[in-house]
Amino acid sequence: MKKTILTGLRINSDFTLGNYLGALLPMVRLANKHSNEFNVNIFVPDLHSIISKIDGDLQKNLIYSIKCYLASGLILNENVHFYRQSYVPAHSELTWVLNCIATTGEMGRMIQFKEKSSGRESTNVGIFDYPVLMASDILLYSASYVPVGEDQFQHIELTRNLAERFNNRFGETFVVPENTKGQVEFMGADAGVRIRDLVNPEKKMSKSTESEKSKILLSDAPNVAAKKIMSATTDSFEDIEFDFETRPGISNLIQILALINNISVGEVLETWRGKTKYGDFKKAVAESVEKLLSSFQEKISEISDDEVLDLFPAGEKYANDVANAKLQEVFEKVGLR
Ligand code: TYM
């Protein structure tokens, strides 16, 4: 049986450079490399998106999100499948079953939940439960590889735990996805990607951060994005070294340059170490970002909405076939059928 690579991006607003470099681009590169031998499932987690505020129109965001994959150079073939989560009811149904083996203790330990609920006395239950929905997204399709940024690694581990628990209790049913080390290796990286906030590089770059200077959005005017890089917080060491512990700002820029140009951090260091104070280096990063956004935005403008909408019928037929077969197996194992 063919293995599966699978990912999704919530569609609450535009995407950040963090979403792009942490998940979108790795997915596109993996898909282009492996789609002859693997299934490549790209789905829109629309149900996940309604756990928090939607900026703009959900339907527009949805179409835009698929355009982003296409504009990043994704090559289509019969193994690449696009579908909307809410068009495949099995996601919600498996979530209910998995809810009954997940514990409130483990769910309460999810960092994303703690961050999204911090400072509030109470939140919607969706925010608490969405990692179980994410586990269903993955397990219904027996996905082995799930390219995501580092902030989602804990959810991959939860998915593995739920799959193993279910298999132990009810018999072999789910393919357990690779552990995070295996995921990182498959992506050809040394570690998970966490693009940092440009003003406070101790934090991850996030769409929900108020300050515009902190984040680069894929729709930012390229010259404005370049300016944000030029004014990014660095440090006073003034030499190029990579260490997120002591020099998160400059390390972030090194990582951005490496990922955009598809080279290793080591290669960036070889070129730049000892050669410069930060100004020239920042200029090189700013130029890379500017070039990336210009070409990306041009490609987006060339893709019509219909081109995207035409992808869903076949993708959703495939997704429902695969997901319903797995759900049936689950229902039988737990005695519902
Ligand atoms: P979401 O929508 O919050 O983020 C989408 C993807 O972008 C990555 N990401 C980052 N990567 C690096 N640096 C950053 N600063 C950064 N910010 C965000 C995220 O890690 C993610 O890969 N629950 C998921 C969506 C989802 C999903 C799934 C993904 C639902 N079901 C099944 C994979 C498989 C989420 O909320 O990601």
Image (spheres, rainbow, N blue to C red):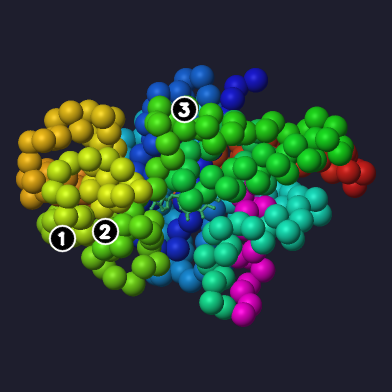
Q: Earlier in the sequence, mark 3 or mark 2?
A: 3
Pick whichever of labels 1 and 2 is earlier in the sequence.
Answer: 2
> Residue visible at 8% across and 50% down?
279
Query: Circle 2 sits on which residue?
Result: 198
Q: Is residue 130 magenta?
A: yes
Residue 290 at x, y = what percent? 15, 49
The stretch in magenta equals 121-135
Q: Secondary structure at mark 3?
A: helix
What residue appears at the point 15 percent right and 43 percent down from the top-left corner? 239
Query: Residue 16 placed where, x, y %?
Result: 33, 55
Whether residue 46 is visible: yes
Secondary element type, mark 2: loop
Q: Amino acid at mark 3?
A: Glu
Magenta segment's dominant SS is: helix
Q: Given contact means CB atoms under 8 Å apart, are the residues at marks 1 and 2 in contact?
A: yes
Q: Amino acid at mark 2?
A: Leu
Residues packed near mark 2 inside 10 Å, few (<14), some (14 to 19) or many (20 plus): many
Quadrant containing the N terminus is: top right
Q: Which mark is residue 185?
A: 3
In the rendered image, the quadrant that contains the C terminus is top right
Q: Is residue 284 magenta?
A: no
Up-down relation of residue 288 to residue 208 (above or below): above
Dots 1, 3 in contact, CB < 8 A = no
**Mark 3 and mark 2: Cα distance apart in space:** 27 Å
Left or right of residue 29: residue 125: right
Left or right, 16 with reference to 36:
left
Q: CA distance from mark 1 to mark 2?
A: 8 Å
Work out whether 263 lies above or below 249: above
Give the distance between the C-alpha atoms of the residues marked 1 and 3, in whole angstroms.
Answer: 33 Å
